Image (cartoon, helix red, strand yellow):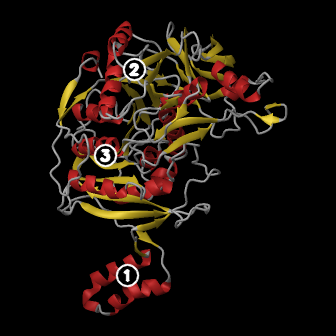
Amino acid sequence: MNDKTSKKTADVTITRAKGRPMLTWVGKKPLNRVTAFPAQHVERFSAADAAKPVQLGEADWSKWPKDLPHGGLLYHGDNKEVLAHLLANGFRGQVKLIYIDPPFDSGADYVRKVQLRGPKGTLKIDGEDYALGEQVQYTDIWSNDNYLQFMYERLLMLRELLSEDGSLVLHCDSGRSHHLRCLLDEVFGSDKQFKNEIIWFYRRWPTNSKNFQAMHDNLFWYTKRSDNTHTFNKLYEAASERTLSDYGGKRLTTLTSEDGTQLKRETEEQSLGVPMRDVWEIRREHTRSHEHTDYPTQKPIELLERLLTALAQPGDLVLDAFIGSGTTAVAAQKLGCRWIGCDINKGAIQTAAKRLQGIMGEQVATLTAGKQGELVASKEVPLPRQLSFTISRVNDYDLHIQHNEVVELACEHLGITRTRTDSFFDGTRGQMLVKIVPLNHPLTPIDLEAVRNELKTRPDEERDILVVSLGQEHKARDWVEHYNHNRPINKIHLIELRTDRKAGGFIRHEPLSAQIKVTRDGDKLVVQIEDVVSPSILQRLDLQEGIFRAQIPDWRAVVDCVLIDTNHDGEVFKVALADVPERKQDLVQGRYELAAPTPDAVVAVKIIDMLGEELVFRTIA
């Protein structure tokens, strides 16, 4: 977007829900209007080489916003704000298929295992492999009312983005399926907009719980309209001879030679198998799978490919508002669809971006082999509609450390007992309730007003409150002093994690650092990374190893990927080279040769470590 547009906000109107039945909950509010914030382009990746043009499939870009490049769109931010941004920038009614896999309200913490790179056994301390433990991706803990309002608002906005012939598929489990089905009926209508409840059946290790083993998820499929104008490509599945005979045999014997066209069509259809049923047995993502990413809620690519094949056509626009590990976008890219994804979790954006760079690179390699390669020769494999994507940020969610992980570390540091059933307070410390304010901003009176409003809903609560923050505005301290004056109960106490005499010193963040040389060698640009130091990783290893000091003999073990922009404009990072090792045991190269840019061009090197922290090094070429 241009600078003038990027600095403006806009109000977006949302049509009210008209369906029945209607759920009621405490705090239910219709979403009539929402503020749309601007987006800031952060990174641009293109797999296509201008020197070797490749053939792309046809797509209708005529309604695409003029300020956006043709390609995939990946947004980092709260999806409510991202959806409002999309509505305000030309995407209302443009999305053919929406798939969402929102939090299941399961009461679980989702973590990913984080390890250093390198062949197993090559990096050790006293006989143990290097491991960084687990990193909290997000916490799936809600109160009933908050969860319903959260989903209600987003479903209303998603309906506005859906095309008239489009579909929405909501993925959930049995814990919330009954509530979500009612919400979907209210938002989309319960007449003929509901098409199917698809059961995804999978196998898992048995447990010793006193109930039947849970081995399925629920997928609710709704359409924008009720007149059957939606896209649906019939799928088939293999069946036994007996099933085929029962399904079509008797029908075929009743047709005569006069019904030749119909006989031919039904014979061909029977040769495909039987129409696919609404129970799908698909294996869960296996840890040894090529697609496995260690993302805690990753769904199998086969599941998304089946949905996209049935409910979208090549060239259509697909949206996933909870993109997670990026499986929806990867499936769309493989099947020739355009795609948009967003997530508030920076780890999700980084994981999705890596996968998309990989699949686009594979597609380019195939397209440039021979006569446009296998993709053009095969009618079963659609041509990609784009070989590039842009990462943008809506509001500022670019944190060095995720809030959920901060909560865990702060609780351990301050002796706080986590309370996982409370939707507002994070735990208790002695006789006090504890609220940990997100560390992306200092404590403000707005944060304190939220505490006071929460206490108003708990008239029987008499405990004092401990508010933990990283920094405090002067107005916040004045607010607390005024609030606590002559108050016998519910006094508010503050801990500032940087400077508190007893509990401070918790946050001593040392940024990622690197030694990088950029030189010209004739018409080549040479980028040599000589060393990378990640204090965050070293600190975590030291905590694990106790008295042993962590030593990392090869700096490449801490690096997840390296990206290079040979002509950086200071705003959008345009990826000219991406070194993203496919397997955890592989290391980045560290030395790179690229075509030399024009004199005085700014070369930028982005390094992302195994915890997701980023460093951008800039120099004049």
For disc 1, the neighbor class at 10 Å (few under 14, some 14 to 19, many from 20) is some
Q: Is residue 612 left or right of residue 32?
A: right
Name the front one of labels 2 and 1: 2
Report the disc number at residue 498. none
Q: Amino acid at mark 3?
A: Leu
Q: Please provide percent x and percent y for residue 472.
A: 42, 12
Who's the residue at 62% across and 61% down the image?
A: 205
Q: Nearer the viewer, residue 604 or 75?
A: 75
* Residue shown at the point (27%, 17%) measured from the top left: 7
Query: Taking the image as drawn, is residue 437 in sight?
Result: no
Pointer 3: what residue?
148
Residue beneath disc 2? 491
Reply above or below: 317 against 304: above
Is label 2 in contact with label 1 (beta carbons under 8 Å)? no
Q: CA distance from mark 2 to mark 1?
A: 78 Å
Q: Which residue is mark 1?
A: 267
**CA gap, disc 1 and disc 3:** 48 Å
Identify the residue at horizontal 25%, vertical 41% (top origin).
157
Q: Nearer the viewer, mark 1 or mark 3?
A: 3
Whether residue 308 is situated above or below residue 452 in the rendered picture: below
Is the residue marked by circle 2 packed among few (<14), some (14-19), or many (20+) residues within 10 Å? some
Q: Disc 1, disc 3: CB below 8 Å?
A: no
**Residue 165 locus on image (x, y percent):** 22, 54
